[in-house]
Amino acid sequence: MSATMTDKKIPCLDLKGQHQQIKHEIFKAFERVYEKTAFTGGPFVEEFEKAFAEYDPWIIWFGTDPKLKSLRDDQRFIDLFRRTGNPMADKLSASR
């Protein structure tokens, strides 16, 4: 391999940089849920459903946010996820 091939840098997706831009907003929302111990149902689910109805761009994090991992086996979570139109919802159902 030539030296020019090994010296070439390929830019990649900077997820950490993207997360840093919204970290404060995500943590603030998580704290609201945590302080009320409202992990299922209630006003936060209603807020999510409203965001879904309006197709809030933040909805894309719904299927990948590690903080939601403990909910991924819950059928209600799977149903909500499926309503986002994300094909990964079917994988959640299949893995149960």
Image: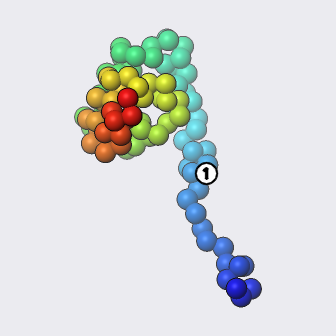
**Which corner quadrant holds the N terminus?**
bottom right
Q: Is residue 43 left or right of residue 20?
A: left
- Tell me what residue is drawn at x 57 percent, y 45 percent: 19
Q: Is residue 81 above or below residue 17?
A: above
Q: Is residue 35 above or below residue 18?
A: above
Q: Is residue 49 above or below residue 11?
A: above
Q: Is residue 41 left or right of residue 23?
A: left
Residue 69 drawn at (x, y percent): 49, 30
**In this view, which residue lies farthest toward the front?**
95
Residue 39 drawn at (x, y percent): 45, 17
**In this view, which residue lies farthest toward the top?**
36
* In front of the other: 59 or 88: 88
* In front of the other: 19 or 94: 94
Residue bearing the label numbered 1: 17
- Viewer can see residue 5: yes
- Tell me what residue is drawn at x 66 percent, y 73 percent: 9
- Viewer can see residue 48: no
**Which corner quadrant holds the C terminus?**
top left
**In this view, which residue lies farthest toward the right?**
3
Residue 79 drawn at (x, y percent): 28, 29
Q: Is residue 16 above or below residue 61?
A: below
Residue 49 drawn at (x, y percent): 29, 28
* In front of the other: 94 or 85: 94
